[in-house]
């Protein structure tokens, strides 16, 4: 979902740019059309103009036809119009295209009314524009070349060559690597699902990791490189979603697979900046004719897997571009940095002040910049829970060993089972280039308040006791008064504790939405203002 939201925002930006360019073109055409219309008005009506002259009965030349016309005018205009002065109405109409290749068709009608007494002209111009839209379909490189040749052969015709959408879709499904790995650009979004047909034996030629409930392909052997791509996730098999890490091993026979490129944060946090141009199509040493990728100096790639000679990687700014990269290529390892300058956002507060609600709002608002960790637990998984998505499940002895080795930021025991947060999960989020959001106990400051994690510490407190009690009475599910007073007492103790000297911001939460917006404003200031941190963090 994070990837889809990101791509939708990118598509919206592209559409905005297209509409802006279209509006500029319309303004330009209007200025040209206005100049030509003014010139036509000065030179008088054109020869194609249809002139209708309406005169009163006293000025008609007589005859039966004139009488019939006058009778119609009397019926339409009323008896009072019989004595009015005659008017002359001149109407013109035209329809044209702005340019031979333009998708905009302009229909214009003009009416000029002349007062016979004063000679004043009244001109009315009505302009209608019809914009013809086009629908694009993703096609393979081979079919794109065929369409391009057809367009060149029929360049003298006004209609563009037609592409059968069903044929294009089937070709894209049969040869996904060729459609996305060649020199042509994929018209469909990078996150669009691909449907392929493969035999279960071909799954033995791929290496995959089960990450946060997703089967992500990290390495593809040359025997299956024409079907699979590193970075793909297998979301469905034969129309059914996969539920556990052992599901792929049980599959047999012919399979219909749904593949979706994994988000950049789901893949390995191994990134390189390329220091020289590279053309995969021209590299004769490439292990397979599939999975060719072209890179320019300065491109950043995400490495999915590597060996002594080759890397399987994808471009960060276009996840559909996947291929082999020689390990000898000049490159530099790089890492993503959060634009906020801090690596961890700590939300502190007494139970019941709303910090978890604010945390959820923040993660939903900007998943590209903020993420949280998955906690550990020693209890058994419950129905519907998945490893790496809801919890990391471990034995009680394994968690005790993590506590003794100093790997746990905080931990606790509930109903005889251990729960806790590992420092390595925080580092994993930081390496992904996002701010790790934690709603933790103040004691975690002793572990996180250093140059490695650079936390931004926010304390969330309730309003005064009387105000908090009044707010509680207005809720549908009100809490006991004793619990409200206990929350206020704990918040007061937190503000007066030794931890308070490390608070960067204190927010009084009267309304979750307002407090959330105030937090966003404070985080935005971090990107533009000077930050003062302990000197030890900079060493």
Image (cartoon, grey):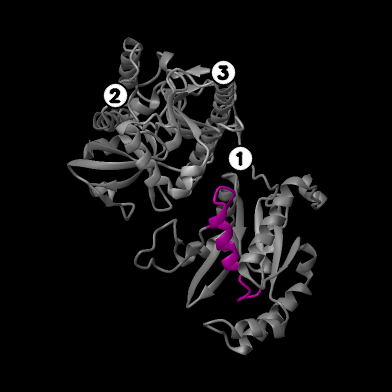
Residue 264 seen in this snapshot:
no
Of the image marks 1 and 3, the number of the one nearer the N terminus: 3
Q: Nearer the viewer, residue 336 or 111?
A: 111
**Observer-nearest of 15 and 155:** 155
Determine whether the residue tagged by mark 3 lies in a helix, strand or loop: loop
Q: Position of residue 357 (x, y in %)?
A: 57, 67
Tell me the magenta residue range: 350-373
Distance, label 1 to label 2, CA atoms, is: 43 Å
Badge number at residue 204: none
Tell me which label, 1 or 2, sits earlier in the chain: 2
Choose mark 3 or mark 2, whichever is in front: 3
Tell me the residue at 48%/39% (across/down). Answer: 11
- Could you tell whether 516 is left or right of 296 in the image? right
Q: CA distance from mark 1 to mark 3?
A: 66 Å
| Residue 352: % across, % down | 60, 76
Q: Alpha carbon of mark 3 to alpha carbon of mark 2: how far?
A: 44 Å
Q: Residues within 10 Å of mark 2 (few under 14, many from 20)?
A: few
Which residue position is annotated with label 3?
43
Residue 526 screen position, x and y as percent = 73, 50
Q: Secondary structure at mark 1?
A: loop
Q: Is residue 351 magenta?
A: yes
Mark 1 highlights which residue? Answer: 336
Q: Which residue is mark 2?
A: 162
| Residue depth check, mark 1 versus mark 2: number of the one nearer the observer | 2
Secondary structure beneath label 2? loop
**Disc 1 and disc 2 in contact, CB within 8 angstroms:** no
Say which label, 3 or 2, has the lower sequence index.
3
Residue at image x 40%, y 32%?
Answer: 133
């Amino acid at each position: 979902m994070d990837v889809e939201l990101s791509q939708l925002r990118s598509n919206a930006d592209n559409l905005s740019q297209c509409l802006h360019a279209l509006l500029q073109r319309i303004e330009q055409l209007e200025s040209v059309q206005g100049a030509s219309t003014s010139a036509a008005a000065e030179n008088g009506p054109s020869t194609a103009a249809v002139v209708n002259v309406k005169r009163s009965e006293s000025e008609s030349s007589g005859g039966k036809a004139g009488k019939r016309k006058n009778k119609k005018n009397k019926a339409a205009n009323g008896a009072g119009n019989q004595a009015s002065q005659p008017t002359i109405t001149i109407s013109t109409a035209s329809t044209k295209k702005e340019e031979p290749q333009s998708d905009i068709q302009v229909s214009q009608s003009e009416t000029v009314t002349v007062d016979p007494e004063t000679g004043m002209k009244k001109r009315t111009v009505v302009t209608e524009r019809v914009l013809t839209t086009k629908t694009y379909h993703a096609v393979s490189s081979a079919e794109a070349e065929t369409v391009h040749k057809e367009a060149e052969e029929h360049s003298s015709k006004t209609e563009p060559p037609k592409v059968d959408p069903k044929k294009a879709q089937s070709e894209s499904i049969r040869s996904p690597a060729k459609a996305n790995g060649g020199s042509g650009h994929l018209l469909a979004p990078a996150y669009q699902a691909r449907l392929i047909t493969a035999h279960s034996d071909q799954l033995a030629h791929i290496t995959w990791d089960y990450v946060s409930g997703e089967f992500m392909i990290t390495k593809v052997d040359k025997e299956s490189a024409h079907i699979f791509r590193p970075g793909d996730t297998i979301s469905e098999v034969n129309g059914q979603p996969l539920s556990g890490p052992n599901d792929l091993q049980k599959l047999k026979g012919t399979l219909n697979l749904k593949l979706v490129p994994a988000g950049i944060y789901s893949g390995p946090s191994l990134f390189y900046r390329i220091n020289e141009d590279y053309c995969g199509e021209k590299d004769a040493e490439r292990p397979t004719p599939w999975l060719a990728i072209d890179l320019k100096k300065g491109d950043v790639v995400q490495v999915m897997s590597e060996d002594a000679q080759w890397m399987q990687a994808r471009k960060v700014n276009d996840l559909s571009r996947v291929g082999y990269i020689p390990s000898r290529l000049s490159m530099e390892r790089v890492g993503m940095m959060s634009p906020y300058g801090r690596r961890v956002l700590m939300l502190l507060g007494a139970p019941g002040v709303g910090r978890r609600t604010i945390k959820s709002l923040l993660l939903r608002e900007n998943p590209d910049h903020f993420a949280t960790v998955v906690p550990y637990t020693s209890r058994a998984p419950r129905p519907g829970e998945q490893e790496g998505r809801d919890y990391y499940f471990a034995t009680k002895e394994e968690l005790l060993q993590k506590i003794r080795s100093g790997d746990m930021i905080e931990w606790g025991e509930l109903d005889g089972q251990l729960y806790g947060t590992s420092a390595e999960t925080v580092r994993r989020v930081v390496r992904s280039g996002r701010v790790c959001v934690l709603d933790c106990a103040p004691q975690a400051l002793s572990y996180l308040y250093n140059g490695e994690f650079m936390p931004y510490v926010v304390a969330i407190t309730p309003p005064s006791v009387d105000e908090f009690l009044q707010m509680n009475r207005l809720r549908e599910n009100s809490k006991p008064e004793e619990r409200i007073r206990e929350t206020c007492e704990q918040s007061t103790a937190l503000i007066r504790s030794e931890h308070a000297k490390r608070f960067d911001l204190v927010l009084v939460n009267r309304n979750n939405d307002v407090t959330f917006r105030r937090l966003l404003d404070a985080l935005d200031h971090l990107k533009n203002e000077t930050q003062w941190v302990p000197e030890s963090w900079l060493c």
